[in-house]
Image (tube, rainbow, N blue to C red):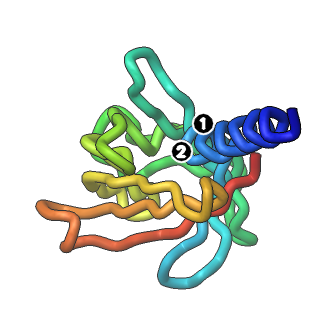
Amino acid sequence: MKQLIAATALGLVSGLVQAQATPVGLWKTIDDETKTEKALVRITELGGGMLSGRIEKLLAADAKPDAKCDKCADDRKDKPLVGLEIIRNVAKDGEAWGGGTILDSAKGKIYKVRITPIEAGKKLEVRGYMGAPMFGRTQTWIRVE
């Protein structure tokens, strides 16, 4: 009986760890160059397993609450940063998520993206790149919820 209880508990714990090893949730973005907190981004699952990420709150001390994406060149041009979709068309790809894009709203540039949960889903490695993943930058985001 003790073995059955222990096996059930272990199964529940491993299920919770796997459930957290997903990019879905609220993340605090950390700038890889300045190491400062920039924003809260909520990643949600759309139909068909596709993921999307939107800026929920700006955290930088100098951030203007009504800031717009004035450097964007696509449909996000002059849209408010809060609520702006910065991650598009990302799908599961093995242990990571990829195939989509991420917007650097400060520069108005769009990059391919690869997202990998680490530390049992407590952190997220977000790699933006052009061409191949080796030609890019990685930020580590921290799960808020």
Residue type for callout 1: Gly
- The quarter of the image holding the N terminus is top right
Residue 80 is at least partly visible in this image: no
Q: Is residue 87 left or right of residue 28?
A: left
Residue extending farthest front:
1
Q: Secondary structure at mark 1?
A: loop
Q: Residue at x 38, y 49 (%)?
A: 95
Q: Residue at x 56, y 31 (%)?
A: 44
Q: Residue at x 67, y 70 (%)?
A: 37
Q: Is residue 41 above or below residue 15?
A: below
Q: Quadrant of residue 142?
A: bottom right
* Residue 85 image offset from top left, x and y in percent: 48, 37
Badge number at residue 23: 2
Q: Is residue 54 left or right of residue 64?
A: left
**Closer to the camera in the image, 62 or 93:** 93
* Marks 1, 2: nearer the viewer: 2
Residue type for callout 2: Pro
Q: Earlier in the sequence, mark 1 or mark 2?
A: 2
Residue 76 is at least partly visible in this image: yes
Residue extending farthest right:
2
Residue extending farthest top:
47
**Closer to the camera in the image, 48 or 29:** 48
Mark 1: few, some, or many residues within 10 Å (few <14, many ≥20)? some
Q: CA distance from mark 1 to mark 2?
A: 18 Å
User: On the image, numbered disc 1 is attached to which residue?
Assistant: 83
Q: Residue at x 48, y 69 (%)?
A: 139
Q: Is residue 47 above or below residue 73?
A: above
Residue extending farthest bottom:
34
